[in-house]
Image (cartoon, rainbow, N blue to C red):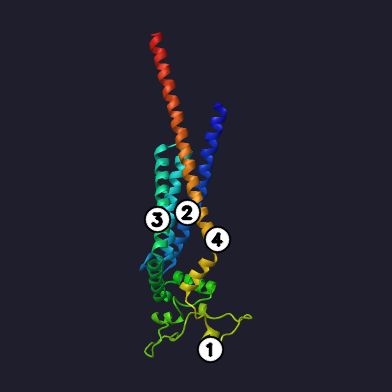
Amino acid sequence: METRRKKSFRAVKYTLFVFCYIFWVFSAVLIAVGVYAKVAKESDAVDTLMAEPALLLIIVGSLMFTITFLGCFGALRNITLLLNVFVGILLAILLLQITAAVLGLLFSEKVQERTEQLMMKAIVRYRDDQDLENVIDFVQKKFKCCGVDSYVDWSENMYFNASTQNPSLEAYGVPFSCCVRLKNEKMENSVVSRLIYTNGCLDEMVWWGKQNLLLVGGMTLALLCIEICMMSLASVQLSQIRSVQQKHRKSSITQNLCCNRKS
C-alpha cells in the first residue's frame, strides 16, 4: 500500500514537472524572439500592445515563464507555498478567460469596434514598424483582403495617402500584399478587383472564424483542458504533501509519547 502511494506521488509530481517544463521552455523562446525583434528595431516608440508584436511576445513570455517556473520548482521541491501560488494564478487566468469569452459574446459589437480601431492604428503605423508590417502583410495574404473595411483604408497611411500633395511614390497605392495572385482566379467586372483584394480584413477574419468554429473552439477547449489538468495535478500533489506531513506529525507525536512513558 505504501509503495503504491509513493509511485502515485512520484507520477503526479513528475507529470506536473514535465508539463510546466515544456511551457517554461516555450515561454523562454517567446521572450528570446521578442527581445531579438525589439533590439533589431530602430524605433522605440510604443503605441499599443496590439500594434507592437515584439513587446507583446516579451510580456506574454515573461508571464508564462514566471508562472511555469513556480510550477516547476514547486513540484520538484514539494514546496506548498509555490504550488498554492501556481494554482491560484492558473485559477485567476481561467476565470478571466471565461469572463472575457462571456463579455465578448454579450458585447460582440463593441469588441468588433475596438478591434477595428486597433487595426486602423496598425495601418497608420505600417511603414514605421517592420514587425507590424510583416504581420499585416501576412494577414492580407492569408485572408486575401486589403485594409480593415476595404482597400480605401490605406489612404489613412501617410505613404499611401490618396492626395495630390503626397510626395510619396506609393501615393494612391496599397501594399503589395493586397495584390491579387492571378492563378486561375475568377475575374470580376471591376478593374480594381482584378488588381487588388477589395474586401476588408476584419470581415474576412470574422467570416473565417465562423467557418472554422470547430477549430477555434477545439484550440480554446484544449488550452482550458491543459490549464485545468495542471491545476488538478498541483492540487493532488498538495493533498499528497499534506497527508505525508500529517503522517510525520502523528509518528513524531507517537514517538514522543513512547519516550515519555519509558522515562
Q: CA distance from mark 4 to mark 3?
A: 21 Å
Q: Which mark is residue 14?
A: none
Residue 223: x and y in percent read: 50, 53
Q: CA distance from mark 4 to mark 1?
A: 37 Å
Disc 4 residue crowd, few under 14, some 14–19, many 20+, Cα 10 Å: few
Q: Secondary structure at mark 4?
A: helix
Q: Residue furthest top?
A: 263
Q: Which mark is residue 214?
A: 4
Q: CA distance from mark 2 to mark 3?
A: 28 Å
Mark 1 vs mark 2, foreground winner is 1
Left/right of residue 204 with respect to residue 106 in the rendered view: right
Quadrant of the rendered image containing residue 254: top left
Examine the rendered structure and indicate whether residue 154 appears above or below residue 261: below
Earlier sequence position, callout 4 versus callout 2 = 2
Q: Secondary structure at mark 1?
A: helix
Q: At label 2, which amino acid type do we have? A: Ala
Q: Secondary structure at mark 3?
A: helix
Examine the rendered structure and indicate whether residue 260 appears above or below residue 2: above
Earlier sequence position, callout 4 versus callout 3 = 3
Residue that numbered label 2 is attached to: 28
Q: At label 3, which amino acid type do we have? A: Thr
Residue that numbered label 3 is attached to: 99
Earlier sequence position, callout 2 versus callout 3 = 2
Q: CA distance from mark 1 to mark 2?
A: 49 Å
Residue that numbered label 1 is attached to: 191
Q: Residue at x 45, y 79 (%)?
A: 150
Disc 3 residue crowd, few under 14, some 14–19, many 20+, Cα 10 Å: few
Q: CA distance from mark 4 to mark 2?
A: 30 Å
Q: Residue furthest bottom?
A: 164
Mark 4 vs mark 1, foreground winner is 4
Q: Secondary structure at mark 2?
A: helix
Disc 1 residue crowd, few under 14, some 14–19, many 20+, Cα 10 Å: few
